[in-house]
Image (cartoon, helix red, strand yellow):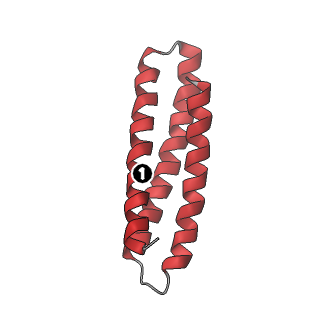
Amino acid sequence: MTRVGYEKNAQLQLDSWNAQIDALEAKLKVAEAEAAIELEEQLSKLYKLRSDAEAQLKDLKSTSDEAWEDVKEGYESAWGDMQSALKQAANRFA
């Protein structure tokens, strides 16, 4: 995959995560107290992971061709963490 294609796919994934987080936020509004506390904790974790992924994507887009592969590895790590956390939250609050 080309760098441009990779960056586009990364942006699409980030957009998808944002939509999934929005859906969890909507569930928070109707959740009972105990579940709401747990969901707030999950959302806090997701916000941090999303921020990390956004920062990695920004670095990916602005890096030189020589350093691109190294930055790509950091993004893929952040991507994996985010994907795992979203799956866990979606399963818990489905």
Locate the C terminus by quadrant: top right
Q: Residue at x 44, y 71 (%)?
A: 60
Residue 55 occupies quadrant: bottom left
Left of 64 or right of it: where is 40?
right
Name which residue type carries label 1: Leu
* Residue 35 drawn at (x, y percent): 57, 18
* Residue 52 drawn at (x, y percent): 50, 57
Q: Secondary structure at mark 1?
A: helix
Q: Which residue is mark 1?
A: 14
Q: Residue at x 52, y 64 (%)?
A: 75
Residue 37 occupies quadrant: top right
Q: Residues within 10 Å of mark 1 (few under 14, many from 20)?
A: some
Q: Is residue 72 above or below residue 76?
A: below
* Residue 50 drawn at (x, y percent): 47, 50
Q: Is residue 30 above or below residue 1?
A: above
Q: Residue at x 49, y 16 (%)?
A: 31
Residue 94 vs residue 32, the one in the foreground:
94
Q: Is residue 67 above or below residue 22?
A: below
Q: Residue at x 59, y 42 (%)?
A: 85
Residue 58 vs residue 33, the one in the foreground:
58
- Residue extending farthest to the bottom is 66
